[in-house]
Image (tube, helix red, strand yellow):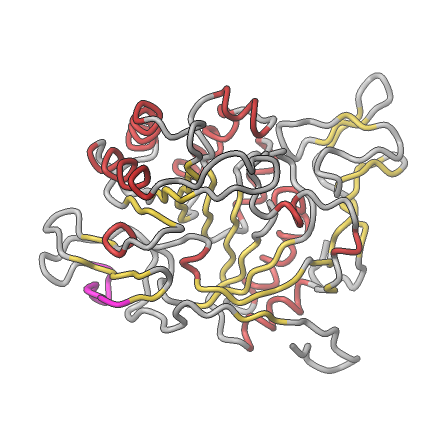
Amino acid sequence: MNVTTPQIGTVPGRYWHHLEDGRIQCDVCPRFCKLKDGQRGLCFVRAREGDQVVLTTWGRSSGFCIDPIEKKPLNHFLPGTPILSFGTAGCNLTCKFCQNYEISKAREMDRLGSLATPEMIARTAKEYGCSAVAFTYNDPVIFLEYAVDVAQACREMGIRTVAVTAGYIGEKAREEFFRHMDAANVDLKGFTEDFYHKLCSAHLADVLETLKYLKHETGVWFELTNLVIPGENDSDAEFDEMTSWVQRELGPDVPMHFTAFHPDWKMMDHPRTPPATLIRAREIAMKNGIRYAYVGNVHDKAGSSTFCHHCGQILIGRDWYQLSDWNLDAHGACTHCGTHCAGVFQPRPGTWGPKRQPVRLVAPSAGSAPAS
């Protein structure tokens, strides 16, 4: 589809095939929903209409906001810069601990109040001086065609794109999807099949395949987030197994974020994550050779800052989303010992800070530029 297409709403999907029993199988994600005419997949936004699968949310958003890029979280991709963030509705997982459930579990399309063509999004990002556009709040895998069209429009204007995703995507679909992304944060939600099956209705192996694909088959910069839930995925043994796998299969330079859980949606009976648990996870990761391990959703400057893995100097100081120290040279190397820091850096950090600015996109009149 051309990114200038003005159509809003339903567009043909690209990843599906017919089954012998007359149903159509959606191949966007490993759930492989098998649909009769009029049925929707678990994500709710992909549906069978007649003889094809369609995406029903092209050009429609649940809202836009300019965030610090560290909120995605990305600590090694254009630090300190603003990023235009948006999502749609629905999700292809069923995480009982979802912290964006009003959007990701939505079954009401009236939540999608913002008309947003790819060109409107790209131009708005440009006008506000954003470094990138983030597909977030719900998983962009389920609105793949829309995300790709937005990414193409952004690339034409020199704006980068970031996918915040669980990485639960089919083999063919992921090739196209990640070909258009510059960076990603992937939720590695746990490291047991039991966790994924019981709490997410998914499979760990499919996520691990996506991570290996990102590392070995693409140039996408990516970081990992592990939401640590007391009693579910917070054992030392699981931290050890997870971080050992990451170091072995993805290498020591993939940043890992261990973030605090707060009770939400269907897991209100679980307590908040103690900061000590996150600190322990970070220590285990570093012991296993992960060079850049962070804690999140808690106040911990040391655990949120970037240090040179060779000499130990602080490279990027962070207090929540506020940057302080900056000891990288123009080439992304430590100013003390010259060791390269993995990531995508500008010669100077951005100055956006912790601000969060809602943005309303307004459809342009004929011949005019989009307003915000």
Residue 368 against residue 126 in the figure, above or below: below
Q: Which one is nearer the viewer's eye here, 157 or 80?
A: 80
| Residue 250 image point, x, y percent | 34, 34
Q: Is residue 242 left or right of residue 82?
A: left
Principal secondary structure, stretch drawn in magenta: loop
- Which of the 4 image quadrants contains residue 265? top right
Tell me how many marks there are.
Answer: 0
| Residue 249 image point, x, y percent | 34, 29
- Residue shown at the point (43%, 41%) measured from the top left: 272
Q: Is residue 71 left or right of residue 295?
A: right
- Residue shown at the point (65%, 27%) measured from the top left: 31
Q: Is residue 371 magenta?
A: no
Q: Which one is nearer the viewer's eye here, 365 or 112?
A: 112
Residue positioned most to the top: 21
- Residue shown at the point (63%, 45%) measured from the top left: 101
Q: Which residues are magenta?
A: 324-333
Q: Which one is nearer the viewer's eye here, 217 or 314?
A: 314
- Which of the 4 image quadrants contains residue 337? bottom left
Q: Is residue 327 magenta?
A: yes
| Residue 118 image point, x, y percent | 66, 63
| Residue 106 image point, x, y percent | 72, 46
Residue 328 against residue 175 in the figure, above or below: below
Which quarter of the image is occupied by the C terminus? bottom right
Q: Is residue 193 left or right of residue 147?
A: left
